[in-house]
């Protein structure tokens, strides 16, 4: 059984991520979408909320499941018999950092990284850019799954309520 992991922050999951999960699910027996628990990074959604949104959107793919991890990705791979990390590569700007991580993960744990070229429809897309556009009222429909859009707009309106820190 070949198990692959798609790791990330997914704050929140975008249609670009979803495209990578779908394509990874076609090449691996099982895909784990693993949310990094990162206490030092502030996020809009809690890990539990991100897992809930991810679980909803991967439901159509029977061989994709969602989990979270803390610490080194290679340690998570080792304890879960994961043989490959699958990442989307959007543009040249992603390449340096992704290559560095891929090489380090191979050195640390002999885990291979496979890059999927992002669908050009989503090559400019990132969770942080989406949050910024949505915060200022820009239209992000079509860039996130509909259920995520509803939750994102609700969360942004809560955080922007007058008097709220
Ligand atoms: O969505 P992100 O925040 O760009 O994802 C980055 C992620 C989670 C893939 C990366 O930060 C990661 O793998 N973190 C786990 C800690 C780790 O293993 N660091 C060493 C990488 S060589």
Image (cartoon, rainbow, N blue to C red):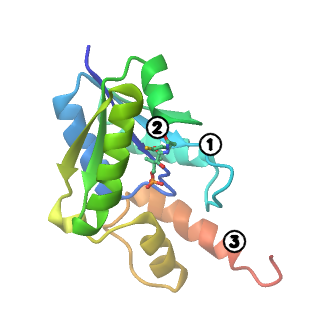
Circle number at residue 118: none
Q: Nearer the viewer, residue 128 or 164?
A: 128
Q: Nearer the viewer, mark 1 or mark 2?
A: 2
Whichever of callouts 2 and 3 sits on the residue coming sooner in the sequence is: 2
Task: Determine the residue located farthest toward the front in the rendered image.
Answer: 107
Q: Which quarter shows the N terminus?
A: top left
Disc 3 marks which residue? 158
**C-alpha separation, residue under disc 2 versus residue under disc 3:** 27 Å
Task: Say which quarter of the image contains residue 64.
Answer: top left
- Asked where in the image residue 119 lies, by quadrant, the reply is bottom left
Task: Indicate the secondary structure of the residue bearing disc 2.
Answer: strand
Name which residue lies at 19% across and 41% down: 23
Q: In the rendered image of this protein, does residue 51 appear above or below residue 27?
A: below
Quadrant containing the C terminus is: bottom right
Q: Which residue is mark 2?
A: 34
Observer-side mark, 2 or 3, equals: 2
Q: Which type of secondary structure does the marked residue at label 3 adopt?
A: helix
Q: What is the x, y in percent for residue 97?
A: 35, 57
Label 2 within 8 A of ligand 1 by Cβ: yes
């Amino acid at each position: 059984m070949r198990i692959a992991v798609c790791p990330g922050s997914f704050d929140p999951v975008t249609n670009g991520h979803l495209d990578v999960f779908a394509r990874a699910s076609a090449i691996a027996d099982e895909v784990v979408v693993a949310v990094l628990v990162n206490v030092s990074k502030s996020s809009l959604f809690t890990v539990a909320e991100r897992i809930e949104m991810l679980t909803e959107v991967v439901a159509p793919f029977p061989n994709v499941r969602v989990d979270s991890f803390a610490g080194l990705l290679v340690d998570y791979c080792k304890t879960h018999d994961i043989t490959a990390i699958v990442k989307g590569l959007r543009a040249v700007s992603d390449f340096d950092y992704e290559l560095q991580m891929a090489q380090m993960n191979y050195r640390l744990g002999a885990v291979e990284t496979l890059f999927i070229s992002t669908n050009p429809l989503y090559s400019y897309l990132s969770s942080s850019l989406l949050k910024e556009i949505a915060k200022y009222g820009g239209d992000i429909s079509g860039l996130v799954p509909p259920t995520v859009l509803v939750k994102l707009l609700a969360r942004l309106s809560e955080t922007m309520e007058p008097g709220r820190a």
